[in-house]
Amino acid sequence: MTQYISRGVSFSDQPSVQPYVTVQVALPELEGGAITDASVFVGTWNSIQFGEPGVGQANDGAIPGWYETDLYAGASVELDHRWTVSGAYYRYLSPADSFKGYNDLELIVSYDDTALWERTGLPNGFSLSPRVRMVQETGKPGLADALYIEPRITVGMNVGDGDNPLHLAIPLAAGFSDTYYHAADGSTPAFGFFRTGVTLSGTPLPHTASSLRVSGGIDLWFPNGETLSGLDSTNIVAKLGLDWTL
């Protein structure tokens, strides 16, 4: 990523590598009736900056430059092959000592609408993939606990001919909160940002490594001008990703 922005707030204006790993275990014994899939998972997500981490934050911890590491665990249930409900606990830490540790409780509800569009004449693989993400932030030093809500749809479709097309995704997301966003006058605006962009992804080795996907694109962030987000009125973030499921 060329810049680390999360929930409409700039956490670092430096390029960063953001590796993650998730271990997921299926729970087939829970399947039956409306439950068509179930699993538990644990993992870690990290942000390692090429330059000074954070925005005016410290960088004197045990591992300078390693701005953030998140530890998470949760469970996911699929209902009727379309609805997915996922809950997780996150612990946020900073090996660079850029911030003090705190917690998140996350709930995501998503819907797979791909089958609704199959006979409409729209491009192959067209979907809107609606989802709502709700996060309760707790224990952040010096700040009140905050509830964050992010509704999102992602316009997706396959592009290109052949058996191995690219997938085009255009997200449309907005962020809202009770106390997460702060203004210069001391108020806490409810609206934080709008985000869109475009991402292309594909499988470069479909026959030898079909679960290896490469992606690239840009995110466009439009923060609420009243918030102290550390962002300009329009922010472009370039990204390149590599994802491999084993």
Image (cartoon, rainbow, N blue to C red):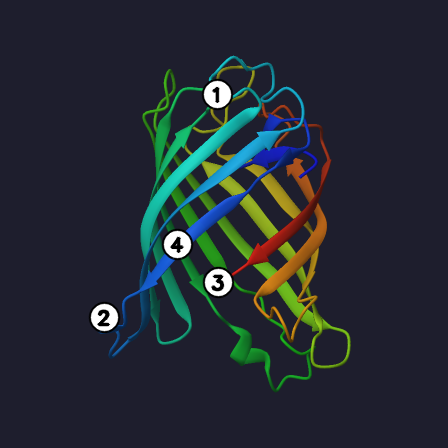
User: Which residue appears farthest toward the right when viewing the image?
Assistant: 160
Residue 65 visible in the displayed image: yes
**Which residue in the structure is indicated by mark 4?**
23
How far is mark 1 from mark 4, CA to CA?
A: 41 Å
Question: Which dot marks residue 30?
Answer: 2
How far is mark 2 from mark 3, CA to CA?
A: 23 Å
SS for dot 2? helix
How far is mark 3 from mark 1, CA to CA?
A: 47 Å
Labels 1 and 4: the sequence-earlier one: 4
SS for dot 4? strand
Question: Which dot marks residue 246?
Answer: 3
In the picture, measured across the screen, residue 215 lies left or right of residue 57, that is right
Question: Which dot marks residue 237?
Answer: none
Mark toward the viewer: 2 or 3? 3
Labels 1 and 2: the sequence-earlier one: 2
Q: Quarter holding the N terminus?
A: top right
Q: Which kind of residue does numbered mark 3 sit on? A: Leu
Residue at 63% from the left image edge and 72% from the top image edge = 208
**Which residue in the structure is indicated by mark 1?**
187
Quadrant of the image occupied by residue 8: top right
How far is mark 3 from mark 4, CA to CA?
A: 10 Å
Across and down, in percent, residue 222 comes to 67, 38
Q: Which kind of residue does numbered mark 2 sit on? A: Leu
In the picture, measured across the screen, residue 53 lies left or right of residue 24, that is right
